[in-house]
Image (tube, rainbow, N blue to C red):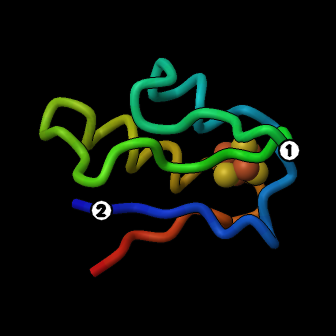
Amino acid sequence: MKVKVNEDKCIGCGSCVSLTDAKVFDFNDDGLAYAKVDEVEVSDKEAVENAITYCPTAAIEEVK
Ligand code: SF4
């Protein structure tokens, strides 16, 4: 599973960073989230799916 954050939609709320314990998402210098891993670990997959579900602006996209 690969994910990316659409910076045009992200409002920097931090939900995805918290839900993944900053293991998958972190903030860039502009205070917006980015995906810091190329491939999501299986153990983090559920947290990432929650992050996708709960992102208030639907900024997180799974890369197929
Ligand atoms: Fe940005 Fe969505 Fe993450 Fe909030 S949950 S920081 S809006 S990508």
Secondary element type, mark 2 = strand
Q: Position of residue 28 (x, y in %)?
A: 71, 40
Cβ at disc 1 under 8 Å from ligand 1: no
Q: Residue at x 50, y 70 (%)?
A: 61
Q: Position of residue 48 (x, y in %)?
A: 39, 44
> Viewer-proximal residue, 49 or 8?
8
Q: Going by the image, does 28 lie left or right of 4?
A: right
Neighbour tally class for label 2: few under 14, some 14-19, many 20 plus, Cα within 10 Å = some
Q: Going by the image, does 57 lie left or right of 48?
A: right
Cβ at disc 2 under 8 Å from ligand 1: no
Q: Residue at x 69, y 35 (%)?
A: 27
Does 34 appear above or below 7?
Answer: above
Q: Residue at x 25, y 46 (%)?
A: 40
Q: Residue furthest bottom?
A: 64
Does 21 appear above or below 43?
Answer: above
Which residue in the protein does label 2 denote? Answer: 2
Which residue in the protein does label 1 denote? Answer: 30
Q: Residue at x 40, y 26 (%)?
A: 23
Q: Position of residue 12 (x, y in %)?
A: 82, 43
* Amino acid type at mark 1: Asp
Q: Position of residue 18 (x, y in %)?
A: 59, 23
Quadrant containing the N terminus is bottom left
- Location of residue 29 by image quarter: top right
* Amino acid type at mark 2: Lys
Q: Going by the image, does 28 lie left or right of 38?
A: right
